Image (spheres, helix red, strand yellow):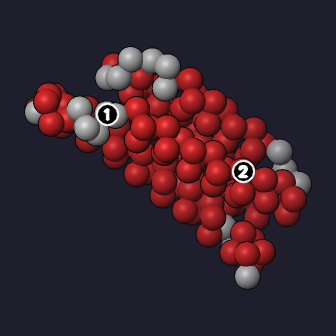
């Protein structure tokens, strides 16, 4: 069952969806914080970003790693790894401004890696 799920690209689709949720979270948090500075702090708590990155890394290992085994192409994993690295690096930047921009760039690169992986499998 897991092999069929991996080969159909479902895990990559889930990872792309998680990337989209991350993008929405980043943009919504920035807008929400600008509107309600005191209540928006909860959305910017570092634990949310660390847990989200853990999920992204876990899905990346499973989906992109399985892609290497199935189709043998390293490019999707390299692109996805770059995106994860940019996302991880953005955790060290201050919230808002550069931190948000680098997170969005990392999420977009990671989603591209998953899309390349999904297209290579099919």
Which quadrant of the rendered structure holds the C terminus? Answer: bottom right
Callout 1 secondary element? loop
- Residue that extends furthest to the bottom in the rendered view of this protein: 1
Residue 82 in the image: state x and y as whole percent.
67, 32
Q: Which residue is mark 1?
A: 44
Query: Where does the N terminus fall, quadrant-wise?
Result: bottom right
Instruction: Tell me what residue is drawn at x 56 percent, y 23 percent.
Output: 89
Upstream in sequence: badge 2 or badge 1: 1
Dot 2 crowding, Cα within 10 Å, few <14, some 14–19, many 20+: some
Do we see residue 108 in this rendering? Answer: no
Q: Residue at x 73, y 75 (%)?
A: 2
Q: Please tell me in which quadrant of the rendered image residue 79 appears.
A: top right
> Horizontal placement of 52 versus 63: left or right?
left
Q: Residue at x 46, y 31 (%)?
A: 103
Percent across and percent down for residue 80 are 67, 42
Query: In this image, 109 relative to 27: left or right?
Result: right
| Residue sticking out furthest to the front | 47
> Is the residue marked by circle 1 packed among few (<14), some (14-19), or many (20+) residues within 10 Å?
some
Q: Which residue is mark 2?
A: 61
Tell me the SS state at disc 2.
helix
| Cβ atoms at labels 2 and 1 below 8 Å apart | no
Q: Residue at x 34, y 34 (%)?
A: 45
What's the mark number on residue 25?
A: none
- Let me know if residue 58 appears in the view: yes
């Amino acid at each position: 069952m897991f092999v069929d799920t991996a080969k159909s690209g479902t895990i990559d689709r889930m990872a792309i969806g998680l990337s989209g949720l991350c993008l929405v979270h980043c943009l919504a948090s920035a807008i929400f914080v600008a509107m309600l500075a005191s209540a928006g702090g909860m959305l910017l708590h570092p634990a949310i970003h660390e847990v989200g990155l853990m999920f992204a890394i876990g899905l990346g290992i499973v989906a992109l790693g399985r892609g290497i085994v199935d189709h043998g192409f390293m490019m999707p994993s390299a692109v996805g790894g770059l995106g994860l690295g940019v996302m991880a690096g953005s955790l060290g930047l201050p919230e808002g401004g550069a931190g948000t921009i680098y997170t969005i760039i990392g999420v977009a690169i990671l989603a591209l890696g998953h899309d390349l992986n999904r297209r290579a499998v099919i």
